[in-house]
Image (cartoon, grey):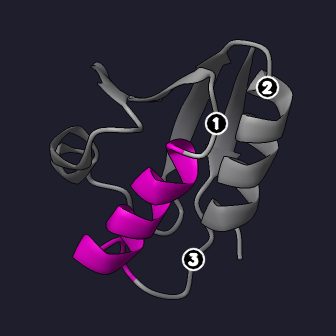
Amino acid sequence: MKKDVVIQMDSAMEATPIAHLVQLANQFESRVYFEMDTKRVNAKSIMGMMSLVLSTGSTVTIDAEGDDEAKAITAMEKFLTK
């Protein structure tokens, strides 16, 4: 299951929000990936997520595979658009 999300966060995606996003991804059994431009990274990897330049207005594709994929995508989208 994939979904494109436009990031709408007030603060830039610095280390603390990235860490919270990784913690959120790790709550799900599904494999969760973020795709942006030509990069595809594991959302459960702090180093991978920090390698992406996630900024307000940019679009990221969330790709989740597993039993709770819909819940994972919904939670990731909610986090990125608050």
- Identify the residue position indicated by label 2 in the image: 68
Q: Earlier in the sequence, mark 1 or mark 2?
A: 1
Locate residue 22 relative to residue 46 in the image: left or right: right
CA–CA distance in space, label 1 to label 2: 7 Å
For badge 1, the amino acid type reads Phe
Q: Residues within 10 Å of mark 1 (few under 14, many from 20)?
A: some
- Identify the residue position indicated by label 3 in the image: 9
Q: Secondary structure at mark 1?
A: loop
CA–CA distance in space, label 3 to label 2: 25 Å
User: In front here: 4 or 1?
Assistant: 1
- Identify the residue position indicated by label 1 in the image: 28
Give the magenta-colored segment's residue range. 12-26
In the rendering, at what x and y percent does residue 15 appear? Answer: 23, 73
In the rendering, at what x and y percent does residue 51 appear? Answer: 16, 45
Do the residues under discs 1 and 2 have CB atoms within 8 angstroms? Answer: yes
Residue depicted at x 35% and y 28%: 42
For discs 3 and 1, the disc positioned in front in the rendered view = 1
